[in-house]
């Protein structure tokens, strides 16, 4: 293949060239420029998002569906996603038993068309050829939204709970730490966390596991709930509508969705169909908007801005 015409061009004071015949030239850089480019952006974001409108805990299929639905419906809201893993996406990178195709029951296929994921139509359900095609497309759509921030490799270690003016215990934000710190509290002296306050927290931390069902378990240990419902056996037809229709504000200030809700309520699991996660995430977005609008009305009344 002969060498193409020179692609040499000037960038500022440097010449760069995209050439694959031995003359590739990058613009020069100082190492400190790379460090500062990352440090400034990350810590400016941490500073700005210390107060958010909605915090979503867990970037699995339910949390990401919630983030997309919320942030597109309400571009005015500061939506902050906290994800414990380095890799967001939760359990939606594969279908079932490590197989790649992802099954989504209608009408959840509406969301696939909304975000632009191709699929094969099988009548009552559709099949995405690889689960990673769904999850990577949804992730890219969410991360492209200007009002969404994702903090991965970051864990929610606790909830902020205040007594509100109706004397109710209200979740008002999250307590965070780097996940590698959260996993090593037993190996070091005390490593205190940081906080993000928000009037609404959406918890989608998945099945009960080392990090999962976090808020469902924390509500019990802090006395805001009596016991885990403990997810029931697999029943696709019962579980998906139960989880979507059951997605709600489980305690003041906290919406629970996805498989964490199955642990909280004791509803059935559905196994390798993902329409319930999509629907639950979208319902959680609707709940979050309802809660914020209600809070604005109350704050308006308190401030005398909204006639009772
Ligand atoms: O994908 P998951 O685990 O949870 P969901 O509810 O979004 O989706 C569940 C779905 O993948 C299924 O399990 C399918 C439908 N199977 C059902 C069945 O019957 O077997 O995502 C939860 C995310 C993960 O990425 C975790 O890393 C993250 O939440 N996470 C946390 N992030 C921050 N702080 C925490 N404390 C935390 N705990 C979990």
Image (cartoon, rainbow, N blue to C red):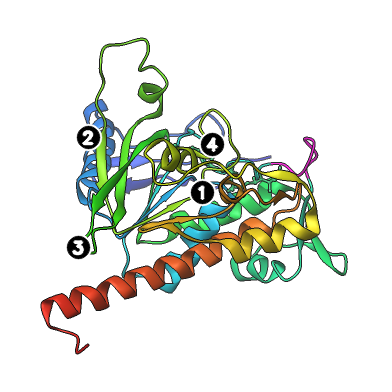
Q: Secondary structure at mark 3?
A: loop
Q: Is residue 78 left or right of residue 60?
A: left
Residue corresponding to mark 4:
212
**Sequence order check: which comes first, mark 4 or mark 1?**
1
Q: Quadrant of residue 25?
A: top left
Q: Disc 2 vs disc 4: Cβ atoms closer than 8 Å?
A: no
Q: Residues within 10 Å of mark 1 (few under 14, many from 20)?
A: many
Residue corresponding to mark 3:
165
Stretch in magenta: 94-100
Residue corresponding to mark 2:
36
Judged from this view, the residue extending furthest toward the front is 226
Q: Alpha carbon of mark 2 to alpha carbon of mark 4: how far?
A: 34 Å
Q: Quadrant of residue 244?
A: bottom right
- Can you say whether 135 is above or below 53 in the image? above
**Sequence order check: which comes first, mark 3 or mark 1?**
3
Q: Position of residue 60 (x, y in %)?
A: 56, 47
Q: Position of residue 69 (x, y in %)?
A: 50, 66
Query: Would residue 128 be seen by someone viewing this image from the given angle?
Result: no
- Image quarter in which the C terminus is found: bottom left
Judged from this view, the residue extending furthest toward the bottom is 307
**Sequence order check: which comes first, mark 2 or mark 4?**
2
Q: Nearer the viewer, mark 2 or mark 4?
A: 4
Cβ of mark 1 under 8 A from ligand 1: yes
- Can you say whether 41 is above or below 308 in the image? above
Q: Disc 4 vs disc 3: Cβ atoms closer than 8 Å?
A: no
Q: Disc 2 vs disc 1: Cβ atoms closer than 8 Å?
A: no
- Can you say whether 178 is above or below 59 in the image? above
**Sequence order check: which comes first, mark 4 or mark 3?**
3
- Can you say whether 88 is above or below 200 in the image? above
Q: Nearer the viewer, mark 2 or mark 3?
A: 3
């Amino acid at each position: 293949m002969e060498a193409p015409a020179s692609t040499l061009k000037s960038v500022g004071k440097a010449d760069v060239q995209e050439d694959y015949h031995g003359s590739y030239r990058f613009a020069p850089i100082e190492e400190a420029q790379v460090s500062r480019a990352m440090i400034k952006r990350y810590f400016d974001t941490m500073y700005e998002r210390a107060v958010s409108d909605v915090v979503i805990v867990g970037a699995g299929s339910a949390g990401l569906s919630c983030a997309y639905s919320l942030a597109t419906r309400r571009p005015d809201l500061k939506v902050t996603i906290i994800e414990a893993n380095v890799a967001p996406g939760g359990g939606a990178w594969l279908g079932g038993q490590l197989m790649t195709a992802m099954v989504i029951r209608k009408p959840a296929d509406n969301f696939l068309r909304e975000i632009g994921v191709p699929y094969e139509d099988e009548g009552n359900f559709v099949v995405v050829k690889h689960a990673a095609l769904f999850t990577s497309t949804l992730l890219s759509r969410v991360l492209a939204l200007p009002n969404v921030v994702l903090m991965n490799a970051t864990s929610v270690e606790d909830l902020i709970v205040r007594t509100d003016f109706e004397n109710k215990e209200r979740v008002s934000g999250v307590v965070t730490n780097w996940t590698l710190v959260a996993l090593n509290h037993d190996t070091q002296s005390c490593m205190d966390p940081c906080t993000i306050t928000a009037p609404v927290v959406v918890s989608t931390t998945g099945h009960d596991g080392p990090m999962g069902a976090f808020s469902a378990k924390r509500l019990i240990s802090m006395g805001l709930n009596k016991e885990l419902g403990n997810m029931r056996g697999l029943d696709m037809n019962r579980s998906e509508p139960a989880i979507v229709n059951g997605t709600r504000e489980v305690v003041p200030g906290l919406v629970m969705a996805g498989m964490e809700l199955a642990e909280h309520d004791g509803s059935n699991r559905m196994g390798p169909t993902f329409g319930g996660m999509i629907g639950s995430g979208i319902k959680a977005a609707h709940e979050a908007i309802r809660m914020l609008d209600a809070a604005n009305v109350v704050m308006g009344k308190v401030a005398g801005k909204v006639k009772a």
